[in-house]
Amino acid sequence: MKFATWNVNSLNIRLQQVLDWLEANPVDVLALQELKLAQDKFPVDALNEAGWQASWLGQKTYNGVALISKQIPTNVVQNNPHFTDEQSRLIAGTFRSESDKKVRVIGGYFPNGQAPDSDKFVYKMAWLDGLRKWLSLELAVHERLVVMGDYNITFDAADVWDPATLEGTIHCTDQERTQLQALIDLGLHDGLRLCAQPDKSFSWWDYRDFGFKRNRGMRIDHILVTKAIKDATTAAFIDKTPRANERPSDHAPVVLEAAL
DNA sequence: ATGCCTTGCTTAGCAAGA
């Protein structure tokens, strides 16, 4: 089974790029973030015409998440049942592998946090507390669980183009990394690092100052998996090609393949 | 570096992203 996550920074702008990417990369589940469109503005017809199903949680202007797949998932959940949130950031669904095993998939757009002393950072921490609570319950009932999306957190210095200068800044604080580690400690694994990666492998590059061309980026988009999926993982990579598109998202897709 | 670029919302400049 193939899983992918991609922050598209406006699905209105990036719809054709998503359709093109799916045609070239027919994954089983693609999690999208930052749709930036209201629930009733989602381009479900265009996706259906291309042969794809979609479950989504929209929001005008900001946020918004979706799961795109060939299958119709069951038990779709929008946002975290254990955290009251006015923002649209989570979508979950249950899929079936080729060998008919149930696989739970959660797609998430984690709060940015803006700056370590801001109200938005406080919200980010509370949001992560709520997510951990929900994931602990999901993990108790799903042996095969994938949690993928834009985490807006780096694991460590290897995920940052200039770790010395950016130490302690947003996405690189100890508090955020402690929260990310707490999710790992529930029984999850960093999917990308299950496979060898080139040095300076990033999933996001700033639009400004030729960030992509100079590889000034961060790895903030992650695919976390349970042990059952970890043990079956055969490939994991960042597909940088769409970042070189005309009018690209500032994020690239992250992909994981597992023999399930 | 209170900058850079890209979105949406609204129609000129702000909020937000990361």
Image (cartoon, helix red, strand yellow):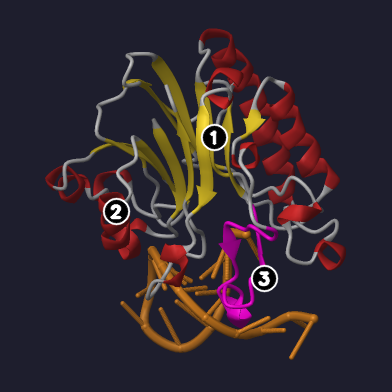
Query: Disc 2 or disc 1, which is closer to the eye?
Result: 2
Q: Which mark is residue A250?
A: none
Do badges 2 and 1 share one subunit? Answer: yes
Q: Is A9 positioned to the left or the right of A202 in the image?
A: left
Q: Write down the residue under mark 1.
A: A85
Q: Is A110 positioned to the left or the right of A13 in the image?
A: right
The numbered mark 2 sits on a residue in which chain? A
Main secondary structure found in the magenta portion: loop
Tell me the magenta residue range.
Answer: A199-219
Q: Residue sitting at 61 percent across and 41 percent down?
A: A195
Contact (Cβ within 8 Å) of mark 2 with mark 3: no
Q: Is residue A86 visible?
A: no
Q: Is A59 positioned to the left or the right of A237 in the image?
A: left
Q: Residue sitting at 72 percent across and 36 percent down?
A: A180
Q: State yes or no: residue A211 in magenta.
A: yes
Camera-nearest residue between A32 and A240: A240
Q: Residue sitting at 31 percent across and 61 percent down?
A: A17
Residue A63 locus on image (x, y percent)? 47, 50
Please tell me whether mark 2 sits on a helix, a strand or a loop: helix
What is the three-letter code of the residue carrying label 3?
Answer: Arg
Q: Write down the residue under mark 3.
A: A216
What is the three-letter code of the residue carrying label 1?
Answer: Asp
Give the mark nearest the N terminus, 2 or 1: 2
The numbered mark 1 sits on a residue in which chain? A
Q: Which mark is residue A24?
A: 2
- Label 3 – label 1 distance at C-alpha: 32 Å
Please tell me whether mark 1 sits on a helix, a strand or a loop: loop
